[in-house]
Image (cartoon, rainbow, N blue to C red):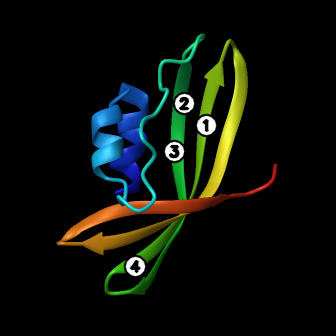
Amino acid sequence: MMRSRYTAFTLGREDYLLATWHPDFRPAGLDLQEDPPARWLGLQVRQHLPIDEDHASVEFVARYKIGGRAHRLHETSRFTRRDGQWLYMDGDIHPK
């Protein structure tokens, strides 16, 4: 699930991101059309931790550039399975 959501970010697929977001936590929309746009450079999944049959967390680092400046997003995300589909709930951003 984490890799497919990362790919959706790289492709600007707001529809997929919202469809895979738990409805209790889902924003009304996303502003993926940044100016200048983000150029995604890579995803490293550091840890996948199953909590129980329907809950898991994923720690990852995503690297990207905006306007030639490098950034990284280090997050631990929480997922839940609902009707057989894994959905993103929320996450904690790790300090730099």
Name above or below for residue 6 compared with residue 88. Answer: above
* Amino acid type, callout 4: His
Residue neighbourhood size for the residue with mark 2, other residues' Cα within 10 Å, grouped as few (<14), some (14–19), many (≥20) = few
Circle 4/circle 1 CB separation < 8 Å: no
**What residue lies at 43% left-to-right and 75% top-to-bottom?**
56
Task: Tell me, for residue 41, which label it has, or none.
Answer: 2
- Helix, strand or loop for disc 1: strand
Task: Tell me, for residue 55, which label it has, or none.
Answer: 4
**What residue lies at 45% left-to-right and 63% top-to-bottom?**
89
Give the residue number, with chain letter if any, for mark 1.
Answer: 63
Across and down, in percent, residue 26 comes to 42, 52
Q: Quadrant of the N terminus?
A: bottom left
Residue nearer the viewer, 27 or 47: 27
* Amino acid type, callout 1: Arg
- Helix, strand or loop for disc 2: strand
State which tag comes first along the sequence, 4 or 1: 4
Kindly report the distance in space between the C-alpha atoms of the residues bearing marks 4 and 1. Answer: 26 Å
